[in-house]
Image (cartoon, rainbow, N blue to C red):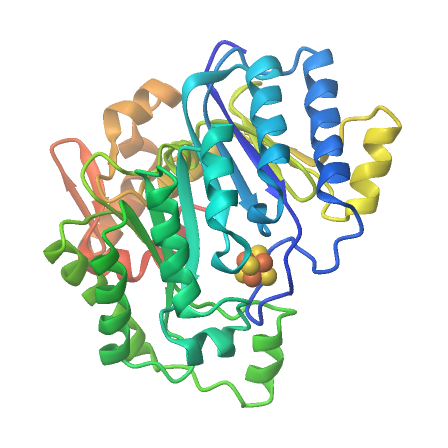
Amino acid sequence: MAEPVSLYIHIPFCVRKCRYCSFVSEADAPLSPREYTDLLLREMALRAGRGAVPSRAPTLYLGGGTPSLLPPGEVGRIIETAGRLLGLEADAEVTLEANPGTVTPASLAGYRAAGVNRLSLGVQSFDDRMLATLGRVHSAREAREAFDAARRAGFDSVGIDLIHSLPGQDIGHWRGELRRAADLSPEHISAYGLTVEEGTTFARLEAQGALLLPGEEESARMFEETAELLAAFGYEHYEISNYARPGRRSRHNRVYWRRGNYLGFGAGAHSFLRSPWPGVRWKNPDELARYGRLLAAGSLPDEDVVSLSGRAAMGEWLFLGLRMLDGVETARFREEFGAELEAVYGGEVERLRAAGLLDAAGGVLRLTRRGILLSNQVFARFL
Ligand code: SF4
């Protein structure tokens, strides 16, 4: 494949399931880290054997689940194999999601030595009460210790993930959370609003009327003040939920938002390639046993394969691109699809402009502040 293709590795294990979590992950992993890594390497080798691999991969992201449950030696095997079989570049951005309750100074030093150069710490809150409500396995102190240990291990690119609009939270509490995160001076901060997903403990509690979430207005204030407060600490708001110091935006996530190529490995991993044009998506089975069986039989575990129509690809290009606050260039739409954005979406764009949700100037479309707040409504128009 001539175009760059990023790599995503899914680690579907956790110490225990958080109460809000709907990600593909399970506690009590039926496989050892070594056995699961063997499966990942088998999938890489199978794909390479069919020639369906990139000639160059600029980023690799180990997500989960809890990738920091893999010992550094296993992470090293994954990175080494990706370099040998999948074109992982020598200066690639290699990110590992780490749960503060699962790392030690030695394991962090091991990840760094294995080639991980960016750490994403799932802190979520600096308040032990909130952490208990969320069902996290770590305390606020452990999160701070993990951050300090990451610095000592040589990580000069560390991100902190936080969640706002938690049960019982108000704007004053959230401001304190942001200040505590910024005081640590990470290069990147992700701040997501809590969403109650089907099938989670939180969904059950909500159905019973036992989950007291902040109202819509309070939630909107938390979102709006995040950008203001973090700007005062030198963070640029560059994507709806992401903030970074200059030059420290996530290269890997930008591939998703720009409709770039990525290959996912592991149970539950998603993939997208732009070829055959205008693109094909698929996912690996969520169920670990099925994922393992397919690989053992020598089959690639690709399921739910969807070839995009031209119109679907255009819609994706717009709503993924608009997630970035720099917006999208209409000239690039023309380059991608050989059509004028105006001709395809002119009416919709005009309506969103009139509603104050979209700004169009100088050949660039971008969300307004109000559009960022109501982004789901904007994106629904392009689906
Ligand atoms: S650590 Fe992350 S993936 Fe694991 S259960 Fe908690 S939220 Fe889900």
Task: Residue 155: name its quadrant.
Answer: top left
Q: Quadrant of the N terminus?
A: top right
| Up/down of 84 relative to 262, above or below | above
Residue 119, given in percent of the width and then of the height, sits at 41, 43
Residue 266, given in percent of the width and then of the height, sits at 67, 37
Residue closest to the eye, 109 or 38 = 109
Taking the image as shown, residue 346 lies to the left or right of residue 2, namely left
| Up/down of 355 relative to 292, above or below | below
Residue 139, given in percent of the width and then of the height, sits at 45, 70
Taking the image as shown, residue 278 lies to the left or right of residue 118, namely right
| Up/down of 61 relative to 20, above or below | above
Which residue is rendered at x = 46% and y = 73% of the image? Answer: 131
Residue 270, given in percent of the width and then of the height, sits at 60, 38
Which residue is rendered at x = 31% and y = 22% of the image? Answer: 334
Residue 221 in view, yes or no: no
Residue closest to the eye, 379 or 93 = 93
Which residue is rendered at x = 61% and y = 33% of the image? Answer: 73
